[in-house]
Amino acid sequence: MNRDLHSALKAEVISKINAGTIEVVLARLQWGKDVKGFSLHVNPSSYSTAGLQTTDFLGYLGFQRHDRCNFTSFQRCYCKWVNEDFNLQEFASAFNAGYGHVGRAQEALQACGFQLRQPEGWGFFNGRPSGRSSHVSEQISGDGHTAMNVRPMKATEDDRFQFRFTFIDTGRDKAFITHYRPKHLPASSEITGVFKYLGLQEFHSCPEFEFEPCYFTTRRFAQNEGRPFDGNVEHAHRCFDALLTRFSPGIESLLAANAAVENVGMPFLPLVRPAERMKADIATKVIRPVKPAAPKQAGKPTAPPIPDNFDVAISFAGTEREHAQKLAEQLREAGYTVFYDDFYPEQLWGKNLTVFFDEIFRKKARFCVMFISKEYRERKWTIHEARSAQARALDEKGNEYILPIRVDDTDLEGLLPTIGYVPISTGVEKIGEMLVKKLRS
């Protein structure tokens, strides 16, 4: 809407709240009988002496600074257009949660050598222009790998990533190169998006990982005149050493910040919409069969393939993980697509799991196997999965969908006792053989 967010023929405050770090106002502006708009005005009411400010986070979310505002108590604001049904309380909660997460992300990632943008800074609070953060780029041109001389220096890894540290001399530049590799590729939509946001570049044939793909950053080598062992050498090594304990938590916090504000329609990471991310990652990145599907029995009809679906989704509490993994591996070896969360934990990292698991257990599987136990009945995630699966079973109108495995004598609410159970005492291998026969029928 190409109109002033503050003035109209009629302007009024619809609602206003104070939520800790921000004052939030929803205003209605009207220029004619059927011509109206709704603007959101945010007054940041606190700041810190260092680090990312609330004003910076508002800049991330697409707000524009205005130095004259009659809607907020400070008479200055950050504002943007919103819909009529915009929920102030949900926004305030999401903003405060997101700002907390992004602050933790900045602290962790800064230790690893990444600088998050500060597009606004302190200018709002002292009546000065917004402070546009800038720094001298330490990046070098080129692909970060091809050079006259490449010297491996360090290697480390955590639960999710492998890291390599090299020094290159291209003849024109000398630089430190940090290589990042998710342990399971291709990386999820969320990881790809956050890497892009941080400026990591992709290289498809990295010699540090046996010519497999990597992501990398460069840091130009600098030294003080006459003192060749000073400069940024110590800093470069310190940033690499921090990756072991700070990089994954920083990525996790950045994804959590984006997830918080994405829920109110204001994401800041370069990601496609959640439904599109989910479809892409389910289809290609969670788990696929390692060999062609097992042959169907002759003379029997085969079910038509469902796009992006799994043959089996396995729902279980943590106490049954060993059984679930054994069954998942047996089905995968038989050539079937299986949803089992621990095959690719990185692919689920950063997902809205409430929505993601509902999509899996309600829409994307041919059968849902449940390991029913006391723990299963009491865990919030298994309850969520069971409800999604039960909704699907209701839609099936009597067709088989839920295949329960009884671990103990626990009854699961909503699961009829007339449904046939298989006791865990049958043995996971035997249960797997039974399931393969059912899949072939």
Image (cartoon, rainbow, N blue to C red):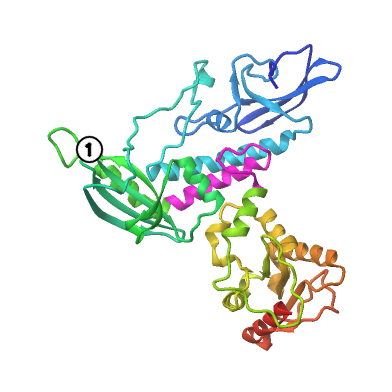
The secondary structure type at the circle numbered 1 is loop
- Looking at the image, residue 76 sits to the left or right of residue 125; the answer is right
Residue at image position (36%, 59%) is 211
Q: Which residue is mark 1?
A: 172
List the single residue furthest toward the left: 226
The answer to which of 53 and 361 lies nearer the viewer is 361
| Image coordinates for residue 106, horizontal then vertical, percent | 46, 40
- Place residue 19 in its image quadrant: top right
List the single residue furthest toward the top: 9
Looking at the image, is 326 positioned above or below residue 201?
below
Residue at image position (31%, 41%) is 219
Query: Does residue 183 appear in this view?
Result: yes
Q: Which residues are magenta?
A: 247-274
Q: Say if the magenta span includes residue 253.
A: yes
Residue at image position (49%, 17%) is 129
Q: Residues within 10 Å of mark 1 (few under 14, many from 20)?
A: few
Amino acid type of the residue tagged 1 in the rendering: Arg
Check the picture and name the quadrant holding the N terminus: top right
Q: Say if the magenta span includes residue 417.
A: no
Residue at image position (15%, 40%) is 228
Query: Does residue 41 appear in this view?
Result: no
| Image coordinates for residue 261, horizontal then vertical, percent | 63, 40
| Image coordinates for residue 20, horizontal then vertical, percent | 63, 33
Looking at the image, is 378 positioned above or below residue 59?
below
The answer to which of 425 and 169 lies nearer the viewer is 169
| Image coordinates for residue 391, horizontal then vertical, percent | 81, 62
Check the picture and name the quadrant holding the C terminus: bottom right
